[in-house]
Image (tube, grey):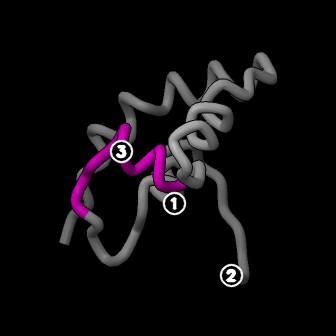
Amino acid sequence: MSLDFSQAESLKQTVVRHSRSNDLTLYAEAQERGMTLSELLEDLDPSPKNNGIDAFERQMLVLGLTGSGR
């Protein structure tokens, strides 16, 4: 099964721009809405949760970041 990252790719530019400029707007917006950053990203990128991958994990994949553990 192939995963569709088209919406994650479009959100990637926003995430990178905020990250590189130390802009915490996404965190502030999530907090104002009573959400976690992951939940906000899911709102901004409502791709189907293929194989249980949420929007935060999709961003890690399209950015080429890897992690281990929980």
Q: Looking at the image, do the residues carrying marks 3 and 1 touch, with CB atoms under 8 Å apart? A: no
Q: Nearer the viewer, mark 3 or mark 1?
A: 3
Using the rendered view, name the quadrant where residue 43 is placed: top left
Using the rendered view, name the quadrant where residue 27 is placed: top right
What type is the residue that disc 1 sits on? Answer: Glu
Name the quadrant of the C terminus: bottom right
Residue identified by numbered label 1: 57
Position of residue 2 relative to residue 5, above or below, is: below
Prevailing secondary structure of the magenta residues: helix
Confirm whether the magenta stretch covers residue 28: no
Residue identified by numbered label 3: 43
SS under mark 1: helix
- Number of disc labels: 3
Q: Look at 58% across and 32% down and name the residue there.
A: 29
What type is the residue that disc 3 sits on? Answer: Asp
Real-space Cα distance between discs 2 and 3?
22 Å
Mark 2 burial class by Cα count in 10 Å: few <14, some 14-19, many 20+? few
> How far across and down, in percent of the image, does residue 28 sit?
67, 33
- Say which mark, if any, is on residue 45: none
From the viewer's perspective, tell me whether residue 47 is left or right of residue 12.
left
The residue at the far left in this view is 1
Real-space Cα distance between discs 3 and 1?
14 Å
Q: Look at 36% across and 28% down and name the residue there.
A: 10
Residue identified by numbered label 2: 70
Q: Which residue is at the front of the view, 42 or 11? A: 42
> How far across and down, in percent of the image, does residue 2 sit?
21, 64
The residue at the far right in this view is 22
Q: Look at 74% across and 21% down and name the residue there.
A: 23
Q: Which residues are magenta?
A: 38-48
What type is the residue that disc 2 sits on? Answer: Arg
Mark 3 burial class by Cα count in 10 Å: few <14, some 14-19, many 20+? few
